[in-house]
Amino acid sequence: MIATEERIEETLREGDRQRDLAAARSRKHFAGVADVGDLPPIKDPERRERCKHDLLAFLQTYFPDSTGLSPFSPKQVEVIRRIERCVLKSGRVLNLMPRGFVKSTISENAILWMALYGHRRYIVFLGATDDDAETAIESLQTELEENQLLEDDFPEVCIPSQKLEGKAQRCASQTYKGVRTKMKWSSGLIVLPSIKGNESFGVRIASRGLLGSMRGLRFKKNGRNVRPDFVVIDDPQTDDSAKSPTQTKVRKRKIQKSVLRLGGHGRQVSVVINATVIEEDDLVDQLGDDKLHPEWQTVRVPMIHKLPDALDTLWLVEYAKIRRNYDQEDLDGQERAKLEATEFYWSNQEEMERGSKVEWENIQLEPDEISALQHGINILIDDGPEVFASECQNRPERQSANLVLSLNRGLLKERLNGIQPHVVPDGRGHVVFHIDIHDELLYWSTAAVGSDFTGSILGFGTWPEQPLPWFTLRSAPIKLSDKYPGADINEAIKLGVRDLILKINETMWISKTGQQFPVSTGLVDAGYKQDPVIEGILLSNFHNVHTSKGLAPGPRDRPVTQYDMSTKRVLRCGPNPLRPRWYFPREFVADGVQRVHFDANFFKEQISARFLQGARQGAWRLPGNSLDAVAPLIEHMIVEEPDQVSGGGSTVNMWKNISRKDNHWWDNIIGCAVAASTMGCQMTLLQIETAKPEPPPQTPELDLPSGRDGLGFFITARR
């Protein structure tokens, strides 16, 4: 019995010895894992020293697959020098660069430069969202773990980073020569190893979403609070926040009241913002306005400094037509069209590039592209002028000037083009029309619109025609019921639509050189009496006429740009498919006749701005040189004014008929603009000019059919 107890005790003692041995082996193993070990010498001390005060050299030397992949453009070099100066000295710098100009990569690699050399001790990266901030910190961690050039010349940082193997819990036990490195390695914070004698000793890199809490951005060192001394903000807004004045205001206040105060009292934190303008008057567009915010040193870098001479001919007409000409149901059709467009460009490259100047020849291209110029113009063609103006040129289309301006009688009388009615000015590629529907009268207008959206009204009138130029909808002496006796309202509208479409298409629309222009497309208002309108269109047998309906969403309504534009819901949309202002809904197709819905407030702003222009590209003009002939049209154009209406955190322009007078020809003109846009004419809103235009040219001598002067279809040419 005693022997048995002794054996049991011996067994227990042996078990304790084994556990002690295992624990000792484990401690020895983990001590070996936790210790960084001996660090190799710097492989190329001269290279490391050469880049210490030269950010450009650092970016090109240590990152051959990103910022060192190809030479930078002059403006990119300027941006990098501005960041360098801000790091080595101080400042508030705003760099506005196009998409694709590696600005985020420059931001991240610049943080590594200032951290590895110890130029800054506490660096904060701010992204538009928490996800953006986390993505950036992961990118920095990847470079420290995997970049062989950095490991060669900065072993005191890269090797301890590699030893963690991505496991943040190892930071607490990591040592170098028995002394804790005090590293931190998480989704929101990197603390570089505290290894004595190194420039990067204990440098901190924190990341946050811009709207995240800033209160935790400090730490204790030797009993003192240490606060951030440098902030890098990369694209501080989202697509949604850029559209919202309320969200823009919130983010702007966050920068002004929180970010710029991170350094505490007595020391101003230095800040660099690298961003792209998304919308007019968005966060960075406001900060980049030197009149509003002179405290920011701002540079705006465009993708294309000068557009080519052949933009409005070879690019936006011939090239764009080839690029867009494919069968939607053919899976390979779009790719073939793009390749065919590139072949056209290749064959005409010298002519298509003449007069152009791009900023960065080495921008990353799509597989079907061969030059930076083609890349930029493809964005203009595919995504529209709004996207091109903001995200490529950092100069968004300016619409704010139109918010308080409307057309007036005196100004419009100066907007005659000096060309006879029905004569298509040079370069106006599309003749379009619009018909406005009423029980007893149809109003119409025609326009010639070029690829750059420069336009001229060709003619206007009513159906039936009136014997005198001055009349109202109620007082018109000749009505549809007179034209079609015995027909009810619906039948009269149907017959009137048919006959008016036929008459417009039978009219000669000619250039000053005698070239005849066919009608490209037409729209007929479907907001009233849709069925007889469609029947009339079908009877006319003119196949490129659609019905139309204007939309006027208020500030609390969802804007047209945010409607569901999926292919299941719409046939097509534009002028920019990403932020459309018109669309053809699938549900409103009757007997093959399609309907277009359009943002009426947007098009009224566009066209009023164009009539307000002086003599320049993109302006719209009235026909002829006789004020008497266009006076009735002018009266219809001036009865509406824009009114800023706010609600739900947004402000929109609502155009209102303040006098309740007739405005039907104004509606026609807007319809013509929509029709031209559906034909691919590129809309780029112009700055308003108040200067008077140049005197109109002399009326050309042309032989036109004789007939009623003024409002009728046929105008007598005056010699």
Image (cartoon, helix red, strand yellow):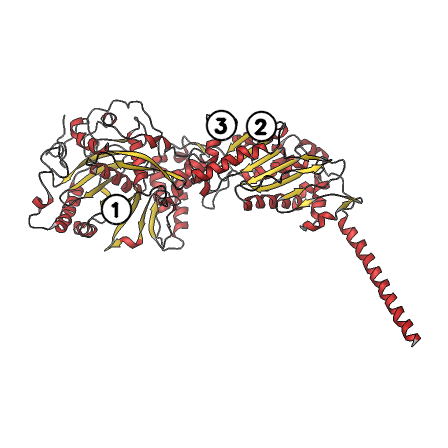
Query: Mark 1 is on which residue type?
Result: Ser
Residue 371 seen from this side: no
Q: Looking at this view, is 102 or 698 the one in front?
A: 102
Which residue corresponds to the image point at 39% horizontal and 33% vertical from the top-left?
308
Q: Is residue 621 above or below residue 337?
A: above
Look at the numbered disc 1 and give the secondary structure of its residue: strand
Question: Which residue does the numbered mark 1 point to in the structure image?
Answer: 548
Q: Looking at this view, is 197 or 715 the one in front?
A: 197
Residue 159 quadrant: top right
Query: Mark 1 or mark 3: which comes first in sequence?
Result: 3
Look at the numbered disc 2 and give the secondary structure of its residue: loop
Please give the label number shown on residue 513.
none
Residue 585 located left or right of residue 373: left
1 or 3: mark nearer the eye: 3
Look at the numbered disc 3 and give the secondary structure of its residue: loop
Residue 105 located left or right of residue 691: right
Q: Rounded to the nearest whole Å, what is the CA distance between mark 3 and mark 2?
A: 14 Å
Please give the label number shown on residue 91.
2
- Tell me, yes or no, whether the two marked residues, 1 and 2, touch with CB atoms within 8 Å: no
Q: Outermost residue, bottom direction?
A: 1
Q: Position of residue 568 (x, y in %)?
A: 36, 55
Q: Looking at this view, is 500 or 233 the one in front?
A: 233
Residue 315 located left or right of residue 438: right
3 or 2: mark nearer the eye: 3
Residue 672 quadrant: top left
Q: Rounded to the nearest whole Å, what is the CA distance between mark 1 and mark 2?
A: 54 Å
Query: Mark 2 is on which residue type?
Result: Gly
Crowding at mark 3 (Cα within 10 Å: few <14, some 14-19, many 20+): few
Residue 441 located left or right of residue 230: left
Which residue corresponds to the image point at 60% horizontal and 44% vertical from the top-left?
139
Question: Which residue does the numbered mark 3 point to in the structure image?
Answer: 293
Q: Position of residue 11 (x, y in %)?
A: 87, 69
